[in-house]
Image (cartoon, grey):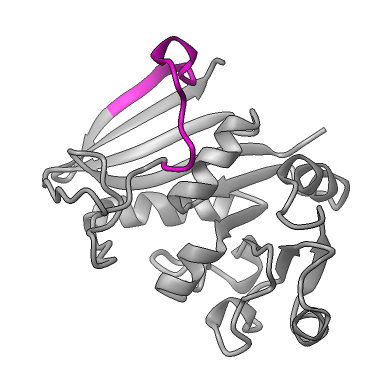
Amino acid sequence: MKPYVILNAAMTLDGKIATRTGSSEISGKEDLIRVHKLRKEMDAIMVGINTLLADDPRLTVHKIEAETEDNPIRIVVDSKARTPLNFRILNKDAPTIIATTENADPQKIEALEKKATVLKCGEDSVDLKSLMKELSRMGVKTLILEGGSTLNYSMLENGLVNEVRVCIAPMIAGGSEAKTLVDGEGIDKMSNAIKLKLKKSYGLGEDLILEYSVTG
């Protein structure tokens, strides 16, 4: 068993989720409201350590009216236990889980355990399949994945994503070093690319929302 996972992201028309300098203000106001409504519906929200370090996000429901109990469980995939102790992810707004590894620095793990639940999944890098099984055992039935691009690829590659929802903003960023929706090692042959099926598409403000199911 594993949670039902929705990969959600905003990107430019050329597929960038941030510029080469890390600027990622892409979504319009209407899309931000959409995202926070989705967060409110989900049991958990997950990001990778690089996204956390770049943005210091709260990962809570705050663009719409909500109570503290509406916040999803926050999960960080952090193989080396690098989550800074002063980051907002460790505040008391919602429970936080740090997914790390057996070989992460024991002192860093001990410090994180004072502020969050720490799960060790794997030796050197987080075993995502094991993490999903553990989250399911903890009662997490639905999860929204909000990046970054490396974690997005790893989750897709391991067959752990059920839906992909993207907001396409009417802008082009360019840049060979700018992060795209999915990076990682990538697929060698297009015939082996991860297959999607369009479920829904609609305009939202100036943006275009596309919702896909992952079929293989």
Residue sitting at x 51%, y 39%: 153
Q: In this view, does 36 lie to the left or right of 122?
A: left
Verify whether residue 141 appears in magenta. Answer: no
State the image quarter where residue 156 is shown. top right
* Residue range highlighted in magenta: 183-201
Q: Nearer the viewer, residue 94 or 184?
A: 184
Quadrant occupied by the N terminus: top right
Q: Where is residue 203 in the image (x, y as percent from the top left)?
A: 20, 34
> Eyeballing the image, is 12 above or below 212?
below
> Eyeballing the image, is 203 above or below 69?
above
Quadrant occupied by the C terminus: top right
Residue sitting at x 69%, y 73%: 81
Residue sitting at x 58%, y 76%: 89
Q: Total label count?
A: 0
Q: Nearer the viewer, residue 214 or 66?
A: 214
Q: Position of residue 32 (x, y in %)?
A: 33, 56
